[in-house]
Amino acid sequence: MPILELENVNFVYQGKNGSSEFSLNNVDLKINKGEFISILGPNGSGKSTLLKIVSGIFQPARGNVLLDSIPVKSYSKKNLAKFMAYVPQTFSVAFPFSVFEIVMMGRTPYMNMFGYENLKDIDVVNSSLEKVGIYHLRNKGINEVSGGEAQRAFIARALAQNPRILLLDEPNAHLDIEHQITIFNTLDQLNSDSELTILMVSHDLNLAGFYGDRILFMKEGEIKMDDAKKNILNEDNIRTIFNVESRVEKSPGGDYFSVNIVPK
């Protein structure tokens, strides 16, 4: 039984004059527990919109989103936050919370009616900070750290929710190369050790070629291709989706792929 399922999902952005500016069309998708999936495609293809529909931020115009065969809209906010965590592409913080406080917000679904954390919550938060490599910044203000460090804090907040599904919208956007590897190694470890299901939007073909096991290619509001990365990450498909030439090299075992874009 899929842990996440989209059935004939349609979504429309309405322009100021009521016309349709963008739409997702007839999206059908089944994701099993423990899969690590990358969503790739050109700008404006619907990747982030799809993630927001899955998370419950956007409501589809038609179709269903199911978690363990139960509609997302049937979950309370508290139970949905225990099931699924979402890390957005951009973030803003109006108040000068510390990094520790930001990550502790991920424990909100587990707190009592008075909102007080217990020792377990503190342990989970410290562990999440260590996993993303920013435990030493826990007392710093979130607005005092770099964009990459703040990004890691929000990933740690999602991990502190102890979710079954983790949704990530371009998690490497603000990270330098070293910390991209740190974060993705952590995600890969959680995926294999805890069967954490990961659905990630990315523009990085190489990261998708190294981490995870399945790729969705989106274009013009539709999932055009969906398969294991070994079957889908090739030069013909990249040309079809991105309109660029590339060279794709496989590791000897066929588990990892390196993608080099060739300028025209």
Image (cartoon, rainbow, N blue to C red):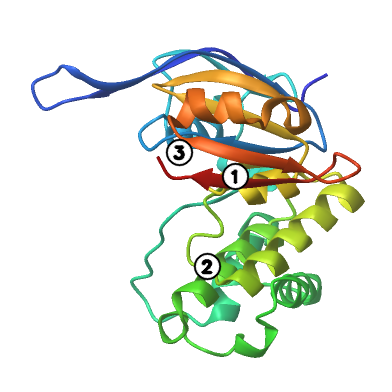
- Measuring from the top left, give residue 27's x and y in whole percent: 53, 15
Element type where label 1 sits in the image? helix
* Marks 2/1: CA–CA distance: 20 Å
Q: Which residue is mark 3?
A: 48
In front: label 1 or label 3: 1
- Dot 1 alpha-carbon crowd within 10 angstroms: few under 14, some 14 to 19, many 20 or more: many
Q: Earlier in the sequence, mark 3 or mark 2?
A: 3
The residue beneath circle 1 is 205
Is residue 92 left or right of 211 when viewed as pictured? Answer: left
Nearer to me, 83 or 211: 211
Picture residue at 88% right of the left edge, 49% below the top: 192
Q: CA distance from mark 1 to mark 3?
A: 16 Å
Q: Is residue 180 above or below residue 229?
A: below
Q: Residue at x 62, y 40 (%)?
A: 247
Label ID, residue 74: none
| Circle 3 crowding by C-alpha within 10 Å: few under 14, some 14–19, many from 20 | many
Picture coordinates of residue 135, whole percent (x, y): 69, 84
| Callout 3–callout 2 Cβ contact below 8 Å | no
